[in-house]
Image (cartoon, rainbow, N blue to C red):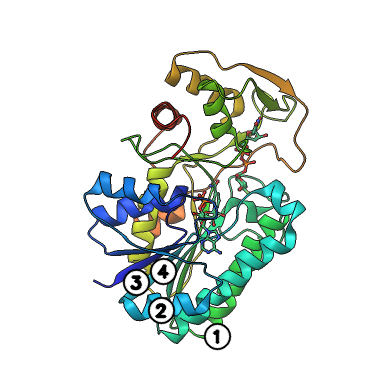
Amino acid sequence: MKDILVTGGAGFIGSHTCVELLEAGYNVVVVDNLSNSKEESLNRVKQITGKSVKFYKADILDKEALDKIFKENDIGSVIHFAGLKAVGESVRKPVEYYHNNITGTLCLIEVMKENNCKTMVFSSSATVYGVKNKAPYTEDMDTSTATNPYGYTKVMIEQILKDLYVSDNEWSIIPLRYFNPIGAHSSGLIGEDPNGIPNNLVPYIAQVAVGKLEQLSVYGDDYETPDGTGVRDYIHVVDLARGHVLAVKYALENKGFEPVNLGTGNGSSVLEVVAAYEKACGKPINKRIAPRRDGDIATSFADASKAKALFGWEAKSDINEMCADSWNFTKKNPNGF
Ligand code: NAD
Ligand code: UFG
């Protein structure tokens, strides 16, 4: 079995995927510039699994460094997480986002090609479904528009990967379109450790629960949803990580370009998530109703049938388990890693 290179492997989803890959018996090589993560996450991965990944602190924009990683290891496939992901920041710093995410991916593809490695699983996002499609989203819907530069990096990288496959059918590329990953490993050793004030719902609630933030703002209660608050398809990060193990196995056995949704197929409203978190942490979450947030849509959830049909993947955890695991990590690591 050849090694798997995980770009961005020290991050939230990457570290959970390293655990699942090591437990499935793969050798894992990680490249990460630690711009949004800490090496401690990989020490924790070792604590959980009893196995180590081989870590390179390097930037995927650095082709020489990438080439050295390919020369020093026997890499058969790449799971490509490395990228900047903050929607609001991408509006303020579009060039930085396009450069890091798109140029970074182009550098990676070039080095892969030079080293005859043509199998990639890529971190895409439900953001590629834009605002015109209606949930449940299926993979064949139009994905040409997004609402912010971050979203456009995913739209454009998917297009680049598709064109790459058309030009050379030896490639095997699976963009995984994640819905809303939350939760943490059940050990409470790894989880989400955002920089500064969190933008996303569950990390924000977690900091209110642990006493670091005063109050949650619920962005809008007048959407066309059952309770008026936004509905999303939250997915446990360990379910998501398991999806990568199955996707990379599929990609190693089948050539093609196959975008696949990773979601549960169910939506939860903001108020339902708050209630689940209150149950998990055993205390009320201080909240107020605030105006809608720019760019938000009412409802987003996946049609998750393609992942099941293609590689037998299904999400297992429900919103209560996701909140319980988020709380377990937060209370054990109130200041992150
Ligand atoms: P994260 O920030 O925790 O992980 C990304 C990692 O990539 C970080 O460790 C960061 O240091 C590293 N990185 C960034 N640029 C790099 C570069 N140029 N060279 C080397 N390393 C670099 O984020 P995450 O939540 O784990 O997300 C992983 C991927 O999944 C990202 O591509 C993200 O866009 C995508 N995604 C995330 C979500 C989500 O809600 N978390 C949803 C959809 C898609
Ligand atoms: N929300 C609040 N208060 C907060 C934060 C969020 O009420 O403090 C609400 C939002 O309005 C939304 C829901 O909680 O209804 C979820 O918001 P998140 O920010 O957690 O997630 P989004 O669905 O907005 O964004 C996520 C990823 C993005 C990705 C997008 C589309 O974070 O990277 O899904 O796939 F682009």
**Residue 291 numbered tag:** none
The nearer-to-camera label among 4 and 1 is: 4
N-term-proximal mark, 3 vs 2 = 2
Spatial distance from mark 3 to mark 1, Cα to Cα?
19 Å
N-term-proximal mark, 4 vs 1 = 4
**Residue 78 numbered tag:** 4
The nearer-to-camera label among 2 and 4 is: 2
Spatial distance from mark 2 to mark 4, Cα to Cα?
15 Å
Label 1 sits on residue: 167
N-term-proximal mark, 1 vs 2 = 2
N-term-proximal mark, 3 vs 4 = 4
Q: Position of residue 146 (x, y in %)?
A: 71, 56
* Classed neighbour count for the residue bearing mark 2: other residues with Cα under 10 Å, few (<14), some (14–19), many (≥20): few
Residue type of the residue flagged with mark 2: Lys
Q: Quadrant of residue 93?
A: bottom right
N-term-proximal mark, 2 vs 4 = 2
Spatial distance from mark 3 to mark 4, Cα to Cα?
10 Å
The C terminus, quarter of image: top left
Find numbered disc 3 in the image and state the secondary structure of the residue it sits on.
helix
Q: Are marks 4 and 1 in contact (CB under 8 Å)?
A: no
**Residue 68 numbered tag:** 2
Q: Is residue 95 left or right of residue 5?
A: right
Q: Residue at x 62, y 44 (%)?
A: 135
N-term-proximal mark, 3 vs 1 = 1
Find numbered disc 1 in the image and state the secondary structure of the residue it sits on.
helix
**Residue 252 numbered tag:** 3
